[in-house]
Amino acid sequence: MNKENETKKINAKRVTLKELDQLMPLGITNNDGSYAKSFEIKRWRMKEEREIGEQKELHKNASIGQYVGIVLSTMCTSIGNINFESLKKAEKNVHISQMFVGDVFYIYTWLRRNSIGNELQLSVKCPNCSNKFKVNVNLDTIEVDTCEKLEDACWNYKLIDPFEIRGKLVTELLMGPPRWMALENLKGTNTANTGAVKAGLILGSIQGIVDWKDENGKPKQIALTVNELDEMCKKDIEKITHEMDENAIGPNMSVEGDCPRCRSDYHMPIDWSYDNFFDISGR
């Protein structure tokens, strides 16, 4: 479960899931600027099993990201400074959509570990010899990158090929952790296609434009549309995608090792779709 030791542009601390326990990697901002990082989960009973099943039936065409929101809105009693027990279902979903991707993944992973156990069995197909085999993952050992505040999780990206947005040249972007809504909007995305997922998150990862300054001289935060990134070149798309992965906060949702047949290296994402991730036998 180890990530490569690459130089990070963000100010992050790496711990294991067992060490971090019931604290989010970043958290939700309080009114005083501090971050509320704790969360509480209810006991997963047959009652909750039926409720989640009913919600899945009602939202058959939901994206995988939306299914994760269904699970968390059902199982969480509080997240950060928000008391979920006092909220309606729709209100819970809005709060989860506004959370950082790394925080949502972390609570989802912790919930799986707490409700079923720390062992997760994965089906692996070797990319070299096509050998199929099972791998047991200990969720307690998953590495999690954490940050004290949002600024620590952001980095600047200088465009290889600058382009115009709204008639102004843009040469540098302020990048950071995307919100969960960016994943919810990826309808029908196959989780095995991590490139498609990361490409869809580029827009959500842009925190501001360094070339444009606000009244405090900081990169101006601005809501862009997908069409406004149409002129971004292929080299920048690929490099930003790589840096997003390198600088991501939250749990490392991938597994790596050696094929038992040909001994070649493999590196694959963990399938976090509900039916697989919460299946005790593994798929």
Image (tube, helix red, strand yellow):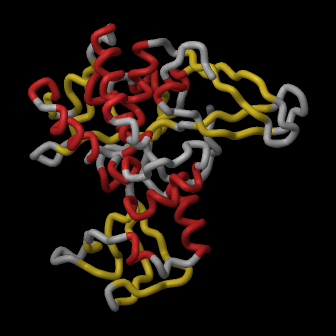
**Image quadrant where residue 239 sits:** bottom right
Residue 158: image x %, image y %?
A: 49, 75
Residue 73: image x %, image y %?
A: 26, 30
Residue 23: image x %, image y %?
A: 32, 29
Q: Classify residue 96 as left or right of residue 241.
A: left
Task: Please state which of residues 254 and 144 is positioned toward the viewer in this rendering.
Answer: 254
Q: Residue at x 16, y 77 (%)?
A: 215
Q: Quadrant of the N terminus?
A: top right
Q: Is residue 48 above or below residue 244?
A: above
Q: Classify residue 183 as left or right of residue 133.
A: left
Q: Residue at x 37, y 44 (%)?
A: 147
Q: Quadrant of the C terminus?
A: top right
Q: Classify residue 7 as left or right of residue 148.
A: right
**Image quadrant where residue 224 sits:** bottom left
**Image quadrant where residue 214 sits:** bottom left
The residue positioned farthest toward the bottom in the image shown: 167
